[in-house]
Every structure is written in structure tokens, then in C-alpha cells.
Amino acid sequence: MHAAKPKMTLGVNIDHIAVLREARKINDPDPVMALAICAQSGANQITIHLREDRRHIHDEDARRIIAMSPLPVNLECAIEPSIIGIVCGLRPHRATLVPEKRQEVTTEGGLDVSGNYSSILNAINELKDHEIEVSLFIDPTREAVETSERLGAQWVELHTGSYANLYAMRHSSLPHSHHAIESLKLSRQELDNKIEQAYGALVDAANYARSLGLKVAAGHGLNYHNVTPIVEIDTIEELNIGQSIIARSVFTGLATAVSDMKVLCQR
Ligand code: PXP
């Protein structure tokens, strides 16, 4: 008999509901309304990002979401001491430390854990003093995993952006994907090899992190088309997914969008 595969949990990133609200700067749609729907539709966690420029989630959203969520809340934030102070006051279940640049559309790469060692260590210690679990959002390399373990993080979240971008280039018919392929001058076979490499890096980093006793999450750019190979990596136990779920919810409703993704997360 085969041993049961470890379960995969699903964190739904609801920032994009606040993005839509901010397009009009009114109070609709309210991300708090998503909490019960996500919980009823199979989500295991709510993820939000309190960005330094507060471009979508505001402090008051974070406070209400943490107070009202029936699911654990994973709060993504920068390592800035002023933000860490706010997060300690908010007391989410977990804080995921992410790199942040004001101009970027979304989080573009993993944390430079070696370059920011002492600031990250200070942030981790302060969060742990407030009994907040800490995860570091890192690129899938052994070096970043090992440094995260040395820093005392309990979790790492592996950045799946490279895998997802290459997958989109290979499979989507969006004009920018074709431009990217042309500018990289890659044949389809070369692109397949690059996807294999990006995927292999995720498998290796996840296995290594688990061997060091870290818990492993992954996320960024995951969608209904590219998620299955990631779910097959047994050492990853959680995915955090936002854009694709909220985008689908516009057409199907949030409950269906979450439960469709939950089905794909089943092992
Ligand atoms: N995980 C982290 C750490 C992130 O910063 C983000 C984007 O906010 C996500 C997951 C979700 O990414 P996406 O919206 O592309 O699914």
C-alpha cells in the first residue's frame, strides 16, 4: 500500500479585491466579504500584503481581516522596521517577509537574504517575540534556503515567478509572450528546457528546505494551467495564489474560483 501523500493547503491572496476597490477609491468591493466565501470554498489560509505605499490593502483592512477571518492570516510585508512594528501590533498568524520596490507592479524576485542578513534577523526576532510565525519569500536556490534556516525562519516561500513566466511564454498566445520569445531568441525546445530547469530548481530547493526542517510554501504567478506540476512536489505543503483566482472570480464568482483551484491542489 502507498503512504498517503502529504496534504497541500491553499492560501488565497485577496489583495486584488482591494485593487479593484482602489480603482474608484470607495468602499466597494470590501475584501472582508471574501473571508467567509474563501473558507466555505476550501481555502485554508487568507494571504494579504500590506505594502509600504498602501496601494491596495490598508492598515484598517489588515486589522479587520485579522480580527474577522475564520482562517489563519498570512501577512506579507517588507523588512522595514516601521512596517514590522505595525505587523507586530496586528498579530497575524504568520508574517511573510518579501522584498519591496515601490515602482514594481508586483513582487518581482525573492528576498536577498544574504545581503540583508542583519535587517532580516532583527525583523524575525521581533516577530517571533510577538509569537508570529515567520516565512521568507526567496528565490529557489540552496543558498537562500540555507541562509533562511540560519536566520531562524520557520517557513520559506519559494518564488515560482520564473517558472510561471516561462510557462506563459511557452503556452500563451499573448503578444508580449511572443515578443519575449523573440527577444530571447529561444526555440520552443529551448524554452521547454528552461521550464524544466526552473521547475528543477523549485524541486531541489523544496527538498533541501524540508531536509533542514523548514516548512515550504510556494507562490507567484500560479494559475489553473501551470499549478499541477507544482502540486506534485511533495515537499511543498502550501501554495499562495491571488491574481488567477480573483481574475476567474469576476466571471464565475469567488466560491467557484476558489473551489476550482482547491480541486487542482488535491494530491
Ligand atoms: N506569494 C507572495 C509572497 C506574493 O508576494 C504574491 C503576490 O502578492 C503571491 C504569493 C501571489 O501571487 P499571484 O497574485 O501572482 O498569485
Image: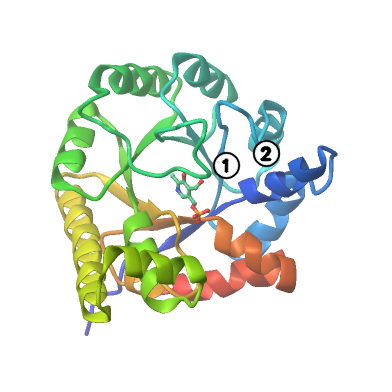
Q: Secondary structure at mark 1?
A: strand
Front-most of residues 14 and 226: 226
- In the rendered image, is residue 96 in sight? yes
Front-most of residues 229 and 25: 25
Front-most of residues 51 and 126: 51
Asked if the residue at tag 2 contacts the one at tag 1, i.e. Cβ–Cβ closer than 8 Å, the answer is yes
Q: Secondary structure at mark 2?
A: helix
Give the quarter of the figure containing the N terminus. bottom left
Disc 2 target residue: 65
Going from N to C along the chain, the mark reached first, 1 or 2, is 1
Left-right relation of 2 to 252: left
Q: Does 161 sit above or below residue 66?
A: below
Left-right relation of 16 to 242: right
| Residue shown at 53% from the left, 56% from the top | 44
Q: Does 40 sit above or below residue 28?
A: below
Q: What percent of the width, then of the height, locates residue 127?
A: 42, 22
User: What's the amino acid at mark 1?
Assistant: Ile
Residue 250: image quadrant is: bottom right
Disc 1 target residue: 48
Q: Which mark is residue 113?
A: none
Q: What percent of the width, then of the height, locates residue 160?
A: 35, 56
Q: What percent of the width, then of the height, locates residue 260?
A: 58, 74
Within 10 angstroms of label 2, few (less than 14), some, or many (20 or more) residues? many
Residue 41: image quadrant is: bottom right
| Residue shown at 31% from the left, 59% from the top | 236
